[in-house]
Image (spheres, rainbow, N blue to C red):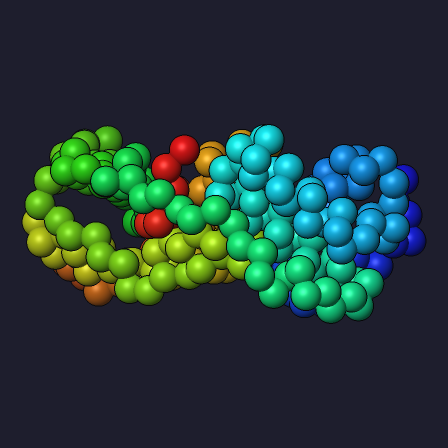
Amino acid sequence: MTTPLRQKMIEDMQLRGFAVRTQEAYLSAVNLLARHYQKSPDQINEEELRQYFLFLKNEKYAARNTCTIALCGIKFFFQHTLGREWKFFEFVRPPKEKKLPVVLGRDWMSIQLDSGDDLMVFVFHEGGGQLVTLFRADGTVTTILDFTLTATGQWSSPSTGAIYPSGWRLVIPEIQADLIVTPVLVDQEVINADYPEGTYWEGSSVVTRDVRWETGVGRGLRGTIRLCVPVNRQEI
């Protein structure tokens, strides 16, 4: 059952243009605060907020992403939904992040061409190599190792503080392909509220191209999907 207070917060976030996943994460943060004190969140005072964030840090040993989501969601609720400008929010900060010596994981991209050909792109972090698999419409498959995938921009999540690449250029000399990949929406972050370290970006993109296949000029391209971890991923 949605209470009037919860509904007001939802409407406030909608007016701000927050993505559905961001709204869910913020609502979850406020709900956990209310459950902690067993009372409506609008009845929680500034000192109780202070004690709650000390609890997250000193007793739950919450990760930075967890604290960041909690702070962003709770701050939005008190400042925008309730209109309380408490000094507490001026100095509370999530724990300092501990960078991994290297960024682990992989980036993955799938591109479907109108011609019926498909591209699968893998870039493995920590010097793990890279490859493109070209699936031709005639059923032949070619593996290509010589290509570059370069980020053309970046996006900082307002929910978690994670920074992701946002837009890419894919150049494959062997098939004379030069592709520009642009996200349909920059905020396609998948937030895992129960396991924040599992948060990542996944979403649809639009591909424009300057492509010349061996048989001539390439035809139009359709959307793509990409998976990637934050470029500033924190140590657990």
* Image position of 8 with respect to 49: above or below: below
Q: In this view, does 153 lie to the left or right of 159?
A: left
Residue under the image location 37 percent in, 37 percent down: 235
Q: Is residue 8 left or right of residue 62?
A: right
Residue under the image location 60 percent in, 31 percent down: 59
Quadrant containing the N terminus is: top right
Q: Looking at the picture, tell me which residue is in the foreground, 133 or 131.
A: 131
Q: Looking at the picture, tell me which residue is in the foreground, 54 or 199.
A: 54
Residue under the image location 23 percent in, 40 percent down: 101
* Image position of 198 with respect to 109: above or below: above
Picture coordinates of residue 15, whole percent (x, y): 72, 67
Q: Quadrant of residue 90?
A: bottom right
Picture coordinates of residue 213, whole percent (x, y): 15, 53
Q: In which quarter of the image is residue 125?
A: top left
Tell me, yes or no, if residue 13 can be seen here. Answer: no
Picture coordinates of residue 222, whole percent (x, y): 39, 53
Q: In which quarter of the image is residue 194?
A: top right
Q: Across the whole image, how many numbered discs are drawn on residues? A: 0
Q: Is residue 180 left or right of residue 230?
A: left
Residue under the image location 33 percent in, 49 percent down: 231
Q: Looking at the picture, tell me which residue is in the foreground, 220 or 75.
A: 75
